[in-house]
């Protein structure tokens, strides 16, 4: 089975974004230069190159064929699972599953289910700490509403203070399969998934680690 794809450029380096190619090339060039002029500096430039490459990781992810499973949107750690009212797209009492993406986590966000993009909005904003209760409504953020076979869900991708590279990688009306790449947020962020309260049986708890397009957040029960 092939990995779900979007219109992304094909990477020259397997496992990395296409944008990583010049970064890695420059880093390796500087390492070679350091070996010739200042060998003591070579380990440092090589380590910085490896760190830069890590920020552009794009591992291959193929979700299992489980139409009634909601998969993780991002690599990170579950912060909370709570009930809220969602007013922007779902307009219903919802479960909100919050995942915190660490600065060194893979920055790629993926569709948690199959469906169609029915709502899309990107908002410029502040760069508050994600510990600030207002961050989810004040920081730079991207909303993606998906219509599925069993109802609507909303994804909110929120940039962390350092995560000023928040990029939408889907479009209004796009047809998604589970695991399709939909956005990227580098240097950390937060992802909130809103789904109608009676639709999902959660299979995660606060503190659990997740992998985008691989870990199961829950099962659809209707």
Image (spheres, grey):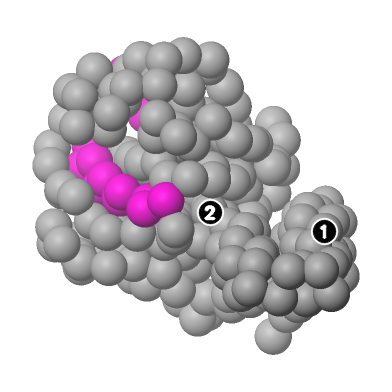
Image position, residue 209 (x, y; %): 27, 68
Q: Residue 83 carries which label?
A: none
Residue carrying label 2? 107
Label 2: few (<14), some (14–19) or many (≥20) C-alpha neighbours in 10 Å: many
Q: Quadrant of residue 104?
A: bottom left
Whole-angstrom CA distance, mark 1 to mark 2, is: 21 Å
Badge 1 marks a residue whose secondary structure is helix
Q: State whether residue 213 appears in this view.
A: yes
Q: State whether residue 177 appears in this view.
A: no
Q: Is residue 16 left or right of residue 144?
A: right
Q: Residue at x 69, y 42 (%)?
A: 169
Q: Do the residues labelled 1 and 2 touch (CB within 8 Å)?
A: no
Mark positioned earlier in the residue sequence (1 or 2): 1
Image position, residue 40 (x, y; %): 63, 73
Residue carrying label 1? 26
Q: Which residue is drawn at 30% across and 63% down?
A: 217
Q: In this view, does 215 lie above or below 166?
A: below
Viewer-nearest residue: 148 or 55: 55
Residue 90 lies in magenta, yes or no? yes
Specify the segment rendered in magenta. Answer: 87-103
Viewer-nearest residue: 205 or 124: 124
Q: Quadrant of residue 137?
A: top left
């Amino acid at each position: 089975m092939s990995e779900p794809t979007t219109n992304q450029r094909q990477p020259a380096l397997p496992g990395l974004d296409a944008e990583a190619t010049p970064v890695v090339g420059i880093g390796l060039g500087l390492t070679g230069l350091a070996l010739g002029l200042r060998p003591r500096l070579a380990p440092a430039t090589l380590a910085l190159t490896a760190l830069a490459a890590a920020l552009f990781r794009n591992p291959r992810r193929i979700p299992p064929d489980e139409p009634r499973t909601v998969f993780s949107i991002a690599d990170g750690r579950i912060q909370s699972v709570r009930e809220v009212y969602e007013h922007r797209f779902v307009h219903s009492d919802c479960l909100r599953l919050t995942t915190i993406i660490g600065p060194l986590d893979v920055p790629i966000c993926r569709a948690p289910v199959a469906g169609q993009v029915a709502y899309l909005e990107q908002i410029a904003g502040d760069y508050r700490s994600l510990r600030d209760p207002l961050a989810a409504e004040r920081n730079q953020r991207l909303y993606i509403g998906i219509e599925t076979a069993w109802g609507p869900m909303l994804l909110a991708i929120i940039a962390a203070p350092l995560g000023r590279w928040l990029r939408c990688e889907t479009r209004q009306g796009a047809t998604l399969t589970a695991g399709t790449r939909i956005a990227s947020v580098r240097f950390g962020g937060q992802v909130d998934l809103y789904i109608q309260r009676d639709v999902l049986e959660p299979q995660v708890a606060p503190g659990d680690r997740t992998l985008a397009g691989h870990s199961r957040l829950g099962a659809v029960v209707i």
